[in-house]
C-alpha cells in the first residue's frame, strides 16, 4: 500500500465550458497536514471540489487509499470518511448550532466525549448551542463549519481558506485546533492564502499556478527560501510573513 492517502494523477477538470485544471499531480501522505498555495484563480478551490466529485473530470485519476474515486458521486466520496469544509462554510443559517452538528453526524447522534473535545477547541459553540447559526459571527461560523467536519473521526479533511476575513485572535484559535488534529495524525489538505498560518501548520506544500501544481515539497524548505516564495507566490502571499 502507498504512503499516500490521497493522490491526483494528471487530473483535468471542467466547469461549464471552461477548462480549469490542466493536469494536476498532487500527493497527501497519510497523517500529514498538506497545504495547497497559489495566487487567486490558480485552481486551488477547484482542486478540492474535484476531489469531492463536484466537477467533471474528463482526464486523469483521483485515488483515495489507492482506490479510484474519480467518478464517484459526492455522497459516496463523503461516505469514505472524507470531510469537506468549503470556502462558503456550508452551514445552515436557520438551524441551531446543535442541529447543524446533528446533520453532519452520519449516525444521527452526537458522541458526548467528542463533543466535549470540540467545545474545548471552540468554546463559542457551547455557548450558542441552541442559537440559530445565522446569528454567529464570521469567526464563529467558521468554527462551526470545521466542527461539523470533526464531529466524527475522519480519514481525510479538505478545508478551503478557513482564515479568510477572520480577526487575528480567531485565526490563532483555528491554528490551535489544527495543531491538535495534527497531533492525532488526521490527514488534512488545506487551501490557504495566509502564509503565516500555512507555515505554522504545514508539513508539505504544493503551489498551483494556472491549473497545475508547479512546486511540491516541504513547507520548511519553502518557508526558509524567500526567493522561491516570491517566484512561486508573488508579493501578495510572501508579504504575509
Image (cartoon, rainbow, N blue to C red):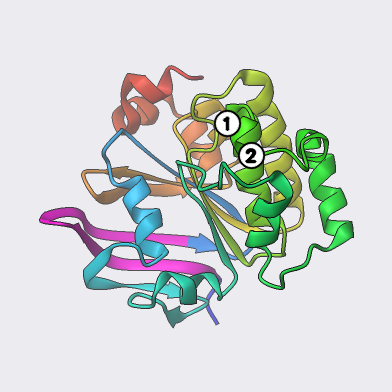
Question: Mark 2 — residue?
Answer: 133
Pointer 1: residues within 10 angstroms few (<14), some, or many (20+)?
A: some
Location of residue 90 with respect to 24 vertically, above or below: above
Q: What main secondary structure does the magenta stretch of the protein show?
A: strand
Badge 2 local density, few (<14 within 10 Å), some, or many (20+)? many
Q: Which mark is residue 108?
A: none
Residue occupying image coordinates x 82% and y 43%: 119
Residue 87 x %, y %: 45, 42
What residue is shown at x 29% (from left), y 46% (from top)?
43
Q: Residue at x 41, y 22 (%)?
A: 238
Q: Mark 2: which secondary structure?
A: helix
Instruction: Please report the residue visible at 40 percent of the width from the left and 25 percent of the height from the top.
Output: 237
Instruction: State the residue in front, 214 or 160.
Output: 160
Q: Position of residue 73 (x, y in %)?
A: 39, 75
Magenta segment: 4-27
Q: Badges 1 and 2: C-beta atoms under 8 Å apart?
A: no
User: Residue 60 occupies which quadrant of the picture?
Assistant: bottom left
Q: Is residue 41 magenta?
A: no
From the image, state whether disc 1 or disc 2 is nearer to you.
Answer: 2
Q: Secondary structure at mark 1?
A: helix
| Figure disc tally | 2
Q: CA gap, disc 1 to disc 2?
A: 26 Å
Looking at the picture, tell me which residue is in the foreground, 172 or 183.
172
Toward the left, the furthest residue is: 17
**The N terminus is located in which quarter?**
bottom right
N-terminal of the pair, mark 1 or mark 2, is 2
Question: Horizontally, is 54 left or right of 142 in the view?
Answer: left
Residue under label 1: 197
x, y percent for residue 156: 58, 63
Amino acid at each position: 500500500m502507498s504512503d499516500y492517502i490521497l493522490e491526483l494523477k494528471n487530473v483535468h477538470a471542467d466547469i461549464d465550458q471552461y477548462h480549469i485544471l490542466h493536469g494536476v499531480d498532487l500527493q497527501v501522505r497519510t497523517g500529514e497536514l498538506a497545504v495547497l498555495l497559489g495566487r487567486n484563480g490558480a485552481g486551488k478551490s477547484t482542486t478540492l471540489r474535484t476531489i469531492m466529485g463536484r466537477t467533471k473530470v474528463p482526464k486523469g485519476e483521483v485515488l483515495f487509499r489507492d482506490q479510484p474515486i474519480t467518478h464517484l458521486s459526492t455522497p459516496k466520496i463523503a461516505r469514505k470518511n472524507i470531510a469537506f469544509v468549503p470556502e462558503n462554510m456550508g452551514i445552515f443559517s436557520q438551524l441551531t448550532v446543535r442541529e447543524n452538528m446533528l446533520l453532519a453526524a452520519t449516525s444521527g447522534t452526537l458522541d458526548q466525549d467528542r463533543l466535549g473535545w470540540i467545545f474545548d477547541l471552540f468554546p463559542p459553540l457551547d455557548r450558542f448551542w441552541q442559537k440559530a447559526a445565522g446569528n454567529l459571527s464570521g469567526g464563529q461560523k467558521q468554527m462551526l463549519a470545521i466542527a461539523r467536519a470533526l464531529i466524527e473521526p475522519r480519514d481525510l479533511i479538505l478545508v478551503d481558506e478557513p482564515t479568510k476575513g477572520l480577526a487575528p485572535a480567531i485565526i490563532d484559535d483555528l491554528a490551535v485546533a489544527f495543531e491538535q488534529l495534527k497531533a492525532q495524525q488526521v490527514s488534512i489538505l488545506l487551501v490557504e492564502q495566509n502564509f503565516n498560518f500555512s507555515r505554522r501548520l504545514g508539513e508539505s506544500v504544493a503551489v498551483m499556478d494556472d491549473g497545475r501544481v508547479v512546486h511540491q515539497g516541504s513547507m520548511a524548505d519553502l518557508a526558509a527560501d524567500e526567493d522561491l516564495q516570491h517566484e512561486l507566490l508573488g508579493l501578495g502571499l510572501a508579504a504575509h510573513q
